[in-house]
Amino acid sequence: MLHLDQLSQGAPRSTAVIGVDFGGTKIDVALASATGSILERLRLPTLAREGPDQALQRVAEVVRKLTAGAEEHGIAVVGHAAVCPGVVQDDRIQLAPNLPGWEDLAISRRLAQAFEVDSVPVWNDVRAGALAEALRGNLRGADPGLYLSLGTGIAAAITINGSVLAGAHHAAGEIGYVGIEMAPSSSTDRAPLEEVIGGKALGERASRLLGEDVDAEALFNRTDPEAQQILHHALGVLAAAVANFAVLIDPARVVVGGGMMASAAPLLAVLRAQLNRTVPFPPEVLAARFTEDASLHGAVTLALNAAERRPGPLRAALTH
């Protein structure tokens, strides 16, 4: 992480942007340079069940603090953006299972008012993470590209020529809802993909079958046959699903990110083997550049992208 003093040294007037990542339990706010390097970051609890008003107010206070600190170092904040889980359409949160009570919130307008700026673009967090990979990460130059986010839940995004496919209802890539066949020992014949490979569901299933508390990270690190059987089944289901996605869109590259990647090194090998075995033209498979803080880097990239598109002196300051 750079420091503000490093950015301002030798520059008559440096520029920066602010990105906000709203999560179900925490909110990250980052001040980033014109190249996307994070200069300063602050974290605060979401307190989602207390409603959006208190969260927006506290975020606005943090943004004012970061902006004032930047100004003291001769750095102008020229853009803002935010990301959140769920479906964001027409600047409103349409679906937010991890943020109860936030549905139908005019989040873009509310943030613009709170930050006292003209506009604040807001995207789905996974789509924003895919944008970061497409413009600054390991999907750069891959057309089309497929971004997989494996964390508490599971989602994907399709990148085309440096842009991210939104879909008619801004819900493209919600692959956690894809139905898959379950193992014969399961209590149901079919289940959504997220209930098999999502980190939360995987930990719950492993705990139930092993008779002890096990989270997804611990499961990946265990070598006993029972744990390996659970993991083998989950990875096989995921690999088969990704192979189907690859046949559908013919990606040049598949990039995998999200919280589970920190402990899931075997995942890439399983995906490569399945794709090489079943897909006519297998794509390259890589770990994401932004395996940690992908959503926050997505918010920063979205802010940079918006500032670069804005006409006038702000664009000139950011791009020169």
Image: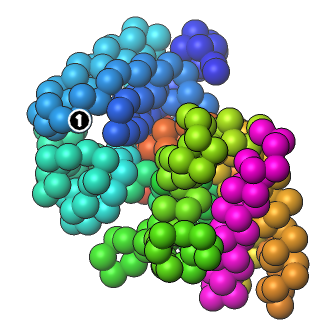
Q: Determine the main secondary structure of the stretch shown in magenta.
A: helix
Alpha-carbon neighbours of circle 1 within 10 Å: few (<14), some, or many (≥20)? many
The number of discs equals 1
| Residue nearer the viewer, 178 or 164 | 178
Left or right: 318 as drawn, with respect to 55: right
Decide if residue 73 is on the left or right side of residue 267: left
Task: Please state the horizontal and vertical placement of residue 25, each as a whole percent of the image.
Answer: 35, 32
Q: Position of residue 164 (x, y in %)?
A: 51, 68
Kindly tell me whether residue 258 is visible in this rendering: no
Q: Which residue is mark 1?
A: 48
- The residue sitting at 49% across, 39% down in the picture is 296
Which residue is drawn at the image coordinates 17% and 55% (left, top)?
Answer: 103
Q: Quadrant of the C terminus?
A: top right
Q: Position of residue 231 (x, y in %)?
A: 72, 55
**Residue 222, above or below 196:** above
Front residue (pair 209, 160):
209
Q: Is 159 part of what is drawn in magenta?
A: no
Residue segment shown in magenta: 222-249
* Left or right for 286, reference 187: right
| Residue 244 located within the stretch drawn in magenta | yes
Please name the residue shown 60% across and 50% down the image: 209
Q: Is residue 89 left or right of residue 78?
A: left
Q: Secondary structure at mark 1?
A: helix
Q: Quadrant of residue 130?
A: bottom right
Which residue is found at the position 34% from the left and 21% from the top?
A: 44
Where, by quadrant of the figure, is residue 250 drawn? bottom right
User: Type of residue at label 1?
Assistant: Ala
Q: Quarter of the image containing the N terminus?
A: top right
